[in-house]
């Protein structure tokens, strides 16, 4: 049975260069999970108001079926580069590959009616 | 000096900025230090944070070889309160830096040097001529890189040879202009 195609969004801001590498990372993990990597929705965030409206806490922000791949906690919305913690504790401009993989696989395996 | 800041071989622009205790700090006079590193950084950028320990380690390692390090934060602190002088002082107090952390409130220092990102590394020789400009090393995610490009440039300057590479692309968050 084909994997359910979750809604994958990548929100980015031009002041932070990591979004292109993040896009590659997400597409690779989508393909590895049996998903169509072209189905990623790339959305540029242009201003503070839009960041506030989107709940954008930094670039890149990656959501699978509306859920952030790494809990942003109490981070305020704003145009900034997002600080990620890798699973080994290192700080990075990119999320941990494992966090992206787990989010995609969990969403792909979820029942269709669970899609938001 | 070009319209976009300084290029390799150019003299360092004047720089006099307050540190986290409010003391004005300047570049050394020509001949006063064997080399001088000016690095743009900030409190909230993942690239700057990821490279921070490598930069402070280099500052410690080269301190007794006549190399001066200065860190500069030019971000607009009104839009980015994490980069306010108070936040800078709090962080400086809590961490080992090995170099003063200067606040460029007017952003004139960033403009005169042509700094673009955090981090953005400028390495000058004893006559304060720019000899290396760019990233600390090739990968912000790999601590084992150890600020290799910066260290290589310093070794070249201290031994009287040409840094190779002399320029790399600075990678990081854009400086937050007002």
Image (cartoon, grey):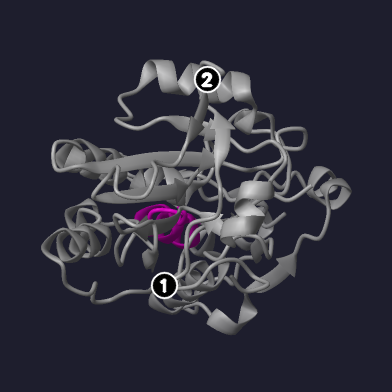
Residue at 50%, 79% in the rendered image: A2
Q: Quick check: is B52 in the magenta stretch?
A: no
Q: Is residue B40 left or right of residue A7?
A: left
Total numbered circles: 2
Residue corresponding to mark 2: B23
- Residue B51 in percent (x, y) is at 35, 48
Secondary structure state at the residue bearing disc 1:
loop
Is A103 within the magenta? yes
User: Tag 2's secondary structure?
Assistant: loop
Q: Which residues are magenta?
A: A93-106
- Tell me where residue A61 sits by quadrant: bottom right
Residue at (73, 67) in percent of width and height: A43
Furthest residue in direction right, as rendered: A49
Is residue B126 or residue A38 the one in the foreground? B126
Residue A38 place in picture, x, y as percent:
60, 83
Q: Which residue is mark 1?
A: B9
Instruction: Answer left or right for A103 relative to B128.
Output: right
Relative to B44, say whether B126 is above or below.
below
Residue A105: horizontal and vertical position, in percent? 44, 61
Tell me, for residue A57, which label it has, or none.
Answer: none
Quarter of the figure with residue B152: bottom left
Q: Main secondary structure of the magenta part?
A: helix
Q: Residue at x 29, y 30 (%)?
A: B98
Q: Which is nearer the N-term, disc 2 or disc 1?
A: 1
Q: Quadrant of residue A5?
A: bottom right
Distance between mark 2 and mark 1 Cα atoms: 29 Å
Residue beneath the point at 56% across and 36% down: B16
Give the chain of mark 1: B
């Amino acid at each position: 049975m084909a994997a359910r195609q979750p809604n994958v969004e990548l929100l980015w801001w031009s002041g932070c260069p990591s979004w292109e590498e993040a896009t590659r990372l997400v597409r690779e993990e989508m393909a590895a999970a049996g998903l169509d990597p072209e189905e990623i929705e790339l959305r540029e965030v242009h201003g503070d108001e839009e960041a506030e409206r989107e709940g954008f806490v930094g670039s890149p922000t990656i959501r699978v079926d509306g859920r952030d791949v790494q809990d942003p906690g109490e981070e305020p919305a704003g145009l900034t580069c997002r600080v990620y913690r890798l699973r080994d504790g290192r700080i990075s401009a990119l999320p941990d590959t494992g966090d992206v993989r787990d989010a995609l696989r969990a969403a792909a395996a979820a029942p269709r009616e669970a899609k938001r | 000096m070009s319209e976009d800041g300084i290029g390799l071989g150019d003299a360092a622009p004047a720089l006099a900025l307050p540190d986290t205790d409010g003391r004005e700090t300047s570049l050394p006079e020509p001949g006063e230090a064997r080399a001088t590193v000016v690095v743009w950084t900030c409190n909230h950028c993942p690239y700057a944070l990821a490279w921070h320990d490598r930069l402070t380690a280099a500052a410690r390692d080269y301190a007794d070889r006549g190399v001066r390090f200065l860190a500069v934060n030019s971000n607009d602190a009104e839009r980015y309160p994490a980069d306010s002088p108070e936040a800078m002082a709090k962080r400086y107090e809590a961490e080992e830096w090995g170099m003063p952390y200067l606040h460029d409130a007017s952003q004139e220092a960033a403009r005169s040097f042509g700094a673009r990102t955090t981090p953005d590394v400028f390495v000058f020789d004893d006559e304060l001529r720019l000899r290396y400009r760019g990233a600390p090393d090739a990968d912000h995610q790999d601590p084992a890189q150890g600020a290799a490009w910066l260290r290589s440039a310093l070794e070249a300057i201290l031994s009287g040879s040409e840094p190779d590479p002399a320029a790399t692309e600075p990678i990081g968050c854009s400086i937050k202009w007002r």
